[in-house]
Image (cartoon, helix red, strand yellow):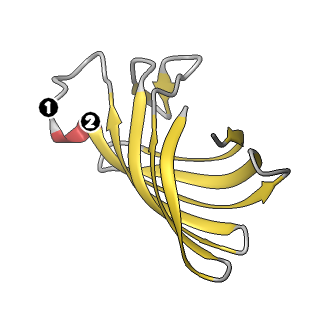
Amino acid sequence: MVVGYEWPLMADVKHGVEYTGPISSSTGQLGSQNVETTLMTFGYKLTYSGFYGKAAYVKLDRDDADLERTKDRAMMYNIGYEHALNDTTTLRISRDRLRSNVVSVTGFSVAALFLF
């Protein structure tokens, strides 16, 4: 689930803040790291004519380390495109990179966003 707010800066340019969580990993792995199935992010997004970039702070819920240790935190960077189907439904595709001193994972994601 993504919870957030966007506000227009000028025509076709929007700022946004998003919270995403929890996200599951079907294998309990994130790259080579053993991670319980929770990943939460909070980040800032800038959108221009549907294209966007996002930088987010990530908290990993690891089952083999103290949750307060710094290796349980990472940064996530996304670039992507959002297409509004109507006033309440948006499709999103993005290239994602999660990086810390322990974890480095890249991939693609596809999502449907429902606005209310």
* Residue 99 location (% of width, % of height): 40, 51
* Residue 100 location (% of width, % of height): 33, 50
Task: Give the CA distance from mark 2 to mark 1.
Answer: 7 Å
Q: Residue at x 16, y 23 (%)?
A: 66
Assign a secondary structure to mark 1: loop
Asked whether, in this view, residue 46 is left or right of residue 116, the answer is left
Asked whether, in this view, residue 34 is left or right of residue 94, the answer is left
Q: Which amino acid, mark 1? A: Glu
The image quadrant where one finds the N terminus is top right
- Check the image and name the residue furthest to the bottom: 10
Q: Is residue 89 above or below residue 46?
A: above
* Residue 65 location (% of width, % of height): 21, 22
Asked whether, in this view, residue 103 is left or right of residue 92, the answer is left
The image quadrant where one finds the C terminus is top right
2 and 1 marks in contact (CB < 8 Å): yes
Q: Residue at x 56, y 66 (%)?
A: 53
Q: Which residue is denoted by mark 2 in the rendering?
A: 72
Work out whether residue 48 or residue 97 is closer to the camera in this orientation and state it.
48
Work out whether residue 97 or residue 43 is closer to the camera in this orientation and state it.
43
Q: Which amino acid, mark 2? A: Asp
Work out whether residue 86 or residue 50 is closer to the camera in this orientation and state it.
86
Q: Which residue is denoted by mark 1 in the rendering?
A: 68
User: What crowding class fits label 2: few (fewer than 14 Cα within 10 Å), some (14-19), or many (20 or more)?
Assistant: many
- Check the image and name the residue furthest to the right: 85
* Residue 74 location (% of width, % of height): 33, 47
User: What crowding class fits label 1: few (fewer than 14 Cα within 10 Å), some (14-19), or many (20 or more)?
Assistant: few
Asked whether, in this view, residue 114 is left or right of residue 55, the answer is right
Q: Residue at x 62, y 67 (%)?
A: 52
Assign a secondary structure to mark 2: helix
